[in-house]
Amino acid sequence: MPLVNVYTSAPSLPDDRASALLRQLSKLLATELRKPESYVMTSLTPRAQMTFGGTDAPACYVEVKSIGNITPKTTEALSKKLCATLNAELGVAPDRIYIEFADAPGHLWGFNGGTFG
């Protein structure tokens, strides 16, 4: 149920590096949100047309969604670690990354023909 979507205007990574980044993000979410990694989904959308601060320099918009465990302490830690990871792997400066955190009610999250509610 944890999900991270990364939209970035940074250049595409080679397939092996993109896969490694997605696995790294999966482990990070599972650890920080204290959820089984078997439920974590990751997504990377490179080469998105974006501006940030009026320029088209590389930027990221990141969505993090989960059912529970989205606390101020958790979002602060995740923001720091996600920005560091995306800076290292995509070359996007942390001050060009927005992260939206959402705590979804279980009944609004479908899985395997049912919901988590």
Image: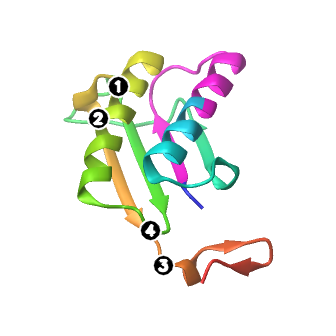
- Which residue is tagged 2? 80
The kind of residue on which mark 2 rests is Lys
In the picture as drawn, the residue positioned furthest to the right comes out as 113
Of residues 69 and 13, the one drawn nearer to the viewer in this rendering: 69
**Image: 19 above or below 49:** above
- Which residue is tagged 4? 68
Do callouts 3 and 2 mark residues in contact (Cβ within 8 Å)? no
Q: Which residues are magenta?
A: 3-23
Measured in 3D between alpha carbons, the distance from the residue under mark 4 to the one under mark 3, in whole angstroms, is 8 Å
The kind of residue on which mark 1 rests is Ala
* Disc sitting over residue 105 in the figure: 3
Measured in 3D between alpha carbons, the distance from the residue under mark 2 to the one under mark 1, in whole angstroms, is 6 Å
Do callouts 4 and 2 mark residues in contact (Cβ within 8 Å)? no
Q: Residues within 10 Å of mark 3 (few under 14, many from 20)?
A: few
- Mark found first going from the N terminus, 3 or 2: 2
- Mark found first going from the N terminus, 1 or 3: 1
